[in-house]
Image (tube, rainbow, N blue to C red):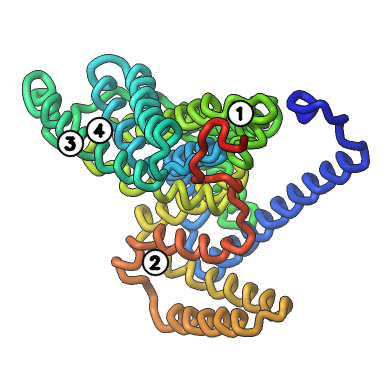
Amino acid sequence: MTATMTDTPPPAAPKADRSAKGSRWTLSRILLLVAGALVLISAVRVITGADQLTSAGQIGAALGLAVPIGLAGLAGLWSERAGVVNIGLEGMMILGTFGAGWIGWQTSPWLGLLCGIAFGVLGGLVHAVVTVTFGVDHIVSGVAINLLALGATQYLAKLFFAGGDAATKGGNPKQSPPAESLGDITVPGLSDALHSVEQHHWFLVSDLAGILGGLVTNVSLVTILAVLLFIASGWILWRTPFGLRLRSCGENPIAAESLGVNVYSHKYAAVAISGGLAGLGGAFLALVTSHIYLEGQTGGRGYIGLAAMIFGNWRPGGLAMGAGLFGFSDALQLRNGGETVHALLLLLVVLLAVLAAWKLYRKAKWQAAISAVVAAVVLVWYLLTDTVPGDFVGATPYVVTLLVLSLSAQRLRMPKADGMRYRKGQGK
């Protein structure tokens, strides 16, 4: 890929070998981390008796809640890899929910899905014009798009859903009439077999069965599309000349321009794709989660998607893990309430104790002491109570967001030119 952009010779073989070894080492660490987390969760389930922690229903719900967050995060990744901060993801998701609900109930849910994507692209193009062409601050533009999208969809909902045929079919100023289902997939035979193993509640084996069962039972077709988009995004951005040029616009647009890259067109393409992905996330909420457009449907998922993107260090794999974590915590508080969240307090104690030991090993004594004290407080809370107050349960996803961002902040590396204004020829 480098040879495509410059006249320099390709890197020497040893460097490539070291890079490949580094990639394999990173993958090994991720697999070890996932395996360790699974063993720990299984142990907490056995000790506390909270069998819903790894049930197929819990995993299926977590997957459904993670998809819109993941798509919003993927949208932010495309935009920020090209150097454009996209705080307007929430607004583009709102546009996607309205477009999908508006067209979905009148025609086909698949056309509604396409309309949701198109509305998101429209929001992305507005953001691109304002930031790339006119050089407006990216944060200001994103906040403006969020406000405009909210106001515009509220007005249009009153216009299209409050009377006529829409009202007779269940529409009102705050929601659209229901659309048909997009369909889902269950793997016959395998789903029932995994459910049978899950019901035995064996250590680790039943947990694996529950997790796999949730991934092969009643899986939406849009969920499968989202997984394919994650894989395609990783391949395009890191394995193609187009992706290399796009990422160079987010790292050093002046150098990219000097090598013949059209920085403006790549930024426009990235932000348009970003809007389309955010619109798809909104369409998922309207057509898969509830089958209707509903005012306030996004519930801040655009912002949580940005948090997942940051947690993932602007990489699709890490982003997927972050979205899964936020979806899992959201599903816990929606499905199980205070008792299951209470069981997670024990898991939090173990994680804080491990963090304290790690900080002590790294000679960060103050941070180790703080982690140990918090672990002790949470342990006392767990031992003296049987459930968690409802207000705290409802705040679980947001508490997880804050904890994850605070713990991962030290290892983050954003694109160097992310959010910076660029003008053609400014390096001359």
- Between the residue at mark 2 and the residue at mark 1, the CA separation in whole angstroms equals 39 Å
- Between the residue at mark 2 and the residue at mark 3, the CA separation in whole angstroms equals 37 Å
Q: Residue furthest left?
A: 163
Which numbered mark, 3 or 4, is in the foreground of this view? 3
Which residue is the site of mark 2? 339
Does 119 sit left or right of 29 as displayed?
left
- Between the residue at mark 3 and the residue at mark 1, the CA separation in whole angstroms equals 34 Å
Label 3, secondary structure: give it.
helix
Which residue is the site of mark 4? 293
- Between the residue at mark 3 and the residue at mark 4, the CA separation in whole angstroms equals 11 Å
Which residue is the site of mark 3? 154
Does 85 sit left or right of 155 as displayed?
right
Q: Earlier in the sequence, mark 3 or mark 4?
A: 3
Task: Identify which amino acid the numbered label 2 is placed on.
Answer: Glu
Dot 3 surroundings within 10 Å: few (below 14), some, or many (20 or more)? Answer: some
| Residue 28 can be seen, yes or no | yes
Which residue is the site of mark 1? 232
Q: Could you tell me residue 371's position as x and y percent?
A: 56, 79
Point out which mark residue 260 bears. none
Task: Identify which amino acid the numbered label 4 is placed on.
Answer: Tyr
Name the quadrant of the N terminus: top right
Residue sitting at 72 percent across and 76 percent down? 362
- Between the residue at mark 1 and the residue at mark 4, the CA separation in whole angstroms equals 28 Å
Dot 1 surroundings within 10 Å: few (below 14), some, or many (20 or more)? Answer: few
